Image: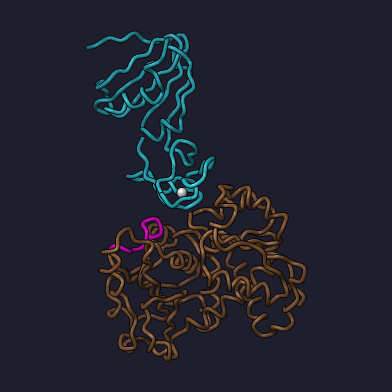
Amino acid sequence: MNLKGRHLIDPGDFSLLELESIFRLAEKIIENKDEYSQICKEKILGTLFYEPSTRTRLSFEAAMLRMGGKVLGFSDANVSSAAKGENIADTIRVLSAYADVVVIRHPKEGAPRLASKYSNIPVINGGDGGHQHPTQTLTDLLTIKKLKGSISGNTVGFCGDLKFGRTVHSLIKTLSRYPDNKFILVSPEELRLPDHLRHMLKNIAQVEIIETEDLETVIGSLDILYMTRIQKERFFNEADYVRLKDSYILTRNKLSEAKEDMLVMHPLPRVNEISYDVDEDDRAAYFKQAEFGVYARMALIAAQLGVGNNA
Amino acid sequence: MLKVESIHYGIVIDHITQGKGKKIFDKLNLGEADFPVVLLRNVVSSKFGKKDIIKIENRIDIDMTMLGLIDPNVTINIVEDEKTIKKMKVEIPKEVQGLFKCKNPRCISNAEDNINPLFTLVKANGTIEYSCEYCEELTSYTL
Ligand SMILES: [Zn+2]
């Protein structure tokens, strides 16, 4: 399996076998961190963050630093060349000479795909608007694999903002490529999954989907509950946000109806959609998920750079 | 019935869905033409009820992709010496570039200049929808 030089813009860019090779490498790294601590010596990760996202940026930086590499970039487009009106194509062509692999976070959808057309080095999509967030997907899949044993055969509930929640879009598309997964989508009417994704799931992937507005009636049938934040900035008006934000909160009380071995996942940061008393429950997997995110990114970067195969 | 002379050398756009002839006439800029052109509306057709027809006494470039987007039922006849020498059926195009912009305001193609996304046909039944290569949003398109 050779992922050297490849871009990751959409999880669909990698075959299931290629994804599996990343998870295998991530598991080897988890078991033997010291052996991988210098594999990116002399390598530079470029970080082009056109919108601030501290968690994602820190996870990438930690991944590169834990492999002995260096990091170079900006985390706020206002102080960068973008503020002077430089287009993405020019920025990436210049950065291709400075770094060995680059992660791009951008508020506009499709910006990383555009960058990949002009880049000589592997491009990683670090999140583009409400569209895709493939390294979060790698993180989520690695978490499911490690904690559930298999990425197939699960009934997965998604709760919250399914319209603008890009983590959900990326994950649901990828899970639908694995056999025997079922989806239960829990959201307010206004924040349902976009039509194009529903069309893809029903007609192309032909997976079973149930859509509901009520978490409590379905929580008992779930193997995994993926909670998402209802993001204020995705709303066009304050009144809608205030009306909807508290409707989909997971509490210890609601969790009592769930299976003993259900996983509660969340891409973080949370606002109030998972109450703090859930953190103590064994089913809460979101902090482990954040930790697995670093290992998933380490494995991805190593594979794209073609290093670490013999460590 | 209204009689229109047949053309000697040119193009007949036939089987246009009734009412769409004017749109095609305008899109092909035929109002500006300095050669003979005629738009026939509400012509009784043996097979389809009523239809529109455009006759062009000249050989011009016709954008089949655009025509397919307006009306996929259309046929194009190339005429020489008053005889049809070639018949072409218009189809809903599988890929479109340059004829419309992405409708998604959050798409990078609407944020920077000189980005011309390729759109790929997603549904062909009922509505015609295209997926943007950058943001993947579906654009249901009417010309
Ligand atoms: Zn677009």
Which residue range is magenta in the image? A190-198
Which residue is at the front of the view, A89 or A114? A89
The type of colouring in the image is: by chain
Residue A277 visible? The answer is yes
In brown, which chain?
A: A
Q: Position of residue A198 (x, y in %)?
A: 38, 60
Picture coordinates of residue A29, whole percent (x, y):
67, 80
Q: What secondary structure predominates along the stretch shown in magenta?
A: helix
Image coordinates of residue A225 in percent, x first then y, are 40, 78
Point out the image quarter for the C terminus of chain A: bottom right
Q: Residue at x 53, y 65 (%)?
A: A134
Left or right of residue B64, residue A60 in this image: right
The color chain B is rendered in: cyan
Q: Residue A148 location in percent, x, y? A: 50, 83
Query: In the image, is residue A84 above or below residue A138?
Result: above
Within the magenta stretch, is there residue A307?
no
The image quadrant of residue A263 is bottom left
Residue at the spot x=40%, y=46% of the render? B103
Q: Is residue B99 above or below residue A240?
A: above
Residue at screen point 27% across, 24% down:
B46
Task: Examine the structure image and report whether residue A192 is included in the region drawn in magenta.
Answer: yes
Q: Nearer the viewer, residue A101 or B33?
A: A101
Q: Residue furthest left?
A: B1
Front position in the image: A297 or A65: A65
Q: Is residue A12 visible?
A: no
Give the image quarter of residue B48: top left
Q: Is residue A308 above or below residue B126?
A: below
Which quadrant: the N terminus of chain A?
bottom right
Residue found 26% across the figure and 20% down from its top: B43
